[in-house]
Amino acid sequence: HYPIVINNEVVSDKIIAAAQKIVGKENIFPRARGMGGEDFSYFANEKPGCMFELGVRNDELGYTVGVHNGSFMLDENALEIGVNIFVQFILDNMNGIEFLT
């Protein structure tokens, strides 16, 4: 019974720009809309936001099982990438984000 997640277009564009600086445009993969529930929707209903997924799979290490599975393992190197994306987003938007209303 979660509300739907609606990514703010301005924030989405800015997080994509930050991610492109970190991992390159060729490593950004838009995801199709889905019907899954997510509690992030409560935050996005209060403040403009953007939910994105960070790839944590590593075939070479055998980390191929998806989340919500007892055998899930993540490539911890991906955590540094995620942090760097957030830091880049902050640096790019230190003076705030102007929203169109």
Image (spheres, rainbow, N blue to C red):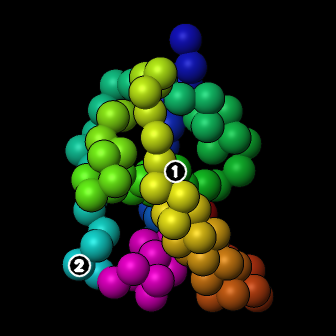
Residue nearest the observer in this picture, 93 or 25? 25
Amino acid type of disc 2?
Glu
Magenta region includes residue 31: no
Looking at the rendered structure, which numbered label has been put on residue 26?
A: 2
When asked about the image quadrant of residue 32, the answer is top left
**Would you say 79 lies left or right of 29 here?**
right
- Height in image: 54 above or below 93? above
Query: Percent from the top left, x then y, of residue 14?
Result: 51, 75
Label 1 environment density (alpha carbons within 10 Å; few <14, some 14–19, many ≥20): some
Q: Check disc 1 and report the residue beneath it.
A: 51
Residue at the spot 52% in from the left edge and 50% down from the top edge: 51
When asked about the image quadrant of residue 86, the answer is bottom right
Q: Which residues are magenta?
A: 15-24
Query: Percent from the top left, x then y, of residue 38?
Result: 53, 29
Query: Percent from the top left, x then y, of residue 87?
Result: 67, 78
Amino acid type of disc 1?
Met
